[in-house]
Every structure is written in C-alpha cells, then in structure tokens.
Image (cartoon, helix red, strand yellow):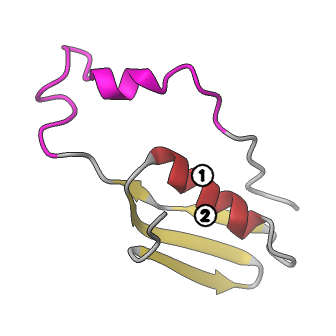
C-alpha cells in the first residue's frame, strides 16, 4: 500500500484524511488504522480512489458500471465506526 499521497490532520480527537489511494479497500484500511488510535473520537475520510483513465461513465454501461468495479461487488466492506461519542 502506497500512502505517499495521503494527508492526515488531527485536531481535538478528530482525524481528517485526505488525498488519493489506488484501491477502494486502501481507503477503508487507512480509516480503520486511524480509528484504532487511542484518543481518536471521529474520523472524517475524504480520501479519493484514483480511477484508471477511461473508466467509469464514458466506457461502462449506461449505468456507469464497468466489469472491474463489478468484480468486487460481492465483497462486504469492513464494519466502520466513524463517531465514538
């Protein structure tokens, strides 16, 4: 996992994540790591997933779904707690 394009800001127990990651799973793993830190009460996840050029509405079906996006559709996202208060 390359986190070189991820920013982390912390203020009074609130962690704000920003920047870009390559895969959607990385976005949630980083959020889980931040949430597990002692003293963190809330995580605001503003991470964006980079899309390969040509992906999305322009090359997918009329609903915007592409084959690559559908492959992970059966996976369950991790259980997340964004607000501990």
Q: Quadrant of residue 17?
A: bottom right
Left or right: 82 with respect to 27? right
Name the quadrant of the C terminus: bottom right
Residue 72 lies within the magenta run: yes
**Which residue shows up at 14% across the image and 45% down it?**
53
Q: Position of residue 67 (x, y in %)?
A: 30, 20
Q: Is residue 77 above or below residue 53?
A: above
**Which residue shows up at 27% across the image and 23% down it?**
66
Of 66 and 18, nearer the camera is 66
Of 39 and 67, nearer the camera is 67
Left or right: 56 with respect to 58? right
Q: Is residue 65 above or below residue 28?
A: above
Secondary structure beneath label 1: helix
Of 22 and 56, nearer the camera is 22
Q: Position of residue 18 (x, y in %)?
A: 46, 70
Q: CA distance from mark 1 to mark 2?
A: 11 Å
Specify whether residue 75 is in view: yes
- Badge 1 crowding class, 10 Å Cα cut-off, few under 14, some 14 to 19, many 20 or more, is some
Give the residues in magenta: 53-77
Q: Position of residue 74 (x, y in %)?
A: 56, 19
User: CB of mark 1 within 8 Å of CB of mark 2?
Assistant: no
- The image shows a total of numbered marks equal to 2
Q: Residue furthest front?
A: 1
The residue labelled by disc 2 is 44
**Which residue shows up at 70% across the image and 75% down it?**
14
- Badge 2 crowding class, 10 Å Cα cut-off, few under 14, some 14 to 19, many 20 or more, is some
The dot on residue 28 is 1
Q: Is residue 59 above or below residue 84?
A: above
The dot on residue 12 is none
**Which residue shows up at 19% across the image and 36% down it?**
55
């Amino acid at each position: 996992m390359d986190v070189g394009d991820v920013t982390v800001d912390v203020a009074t127990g609130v962690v704000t994540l920003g920047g870009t990651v390559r895969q959607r799973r990385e976005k949630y793993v980083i959020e889980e790591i931040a949430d597990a830190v002692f003293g963190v009460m809330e995580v605001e996840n503003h991470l964006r997933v980079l899309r390969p050029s040509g992906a999305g509405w322009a090359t997918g079906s009329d609903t915007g779904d592409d084959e690559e996006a559908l492959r992970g559709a059966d996976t369950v996202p991790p259980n997340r707690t964004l607000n501990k208060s």
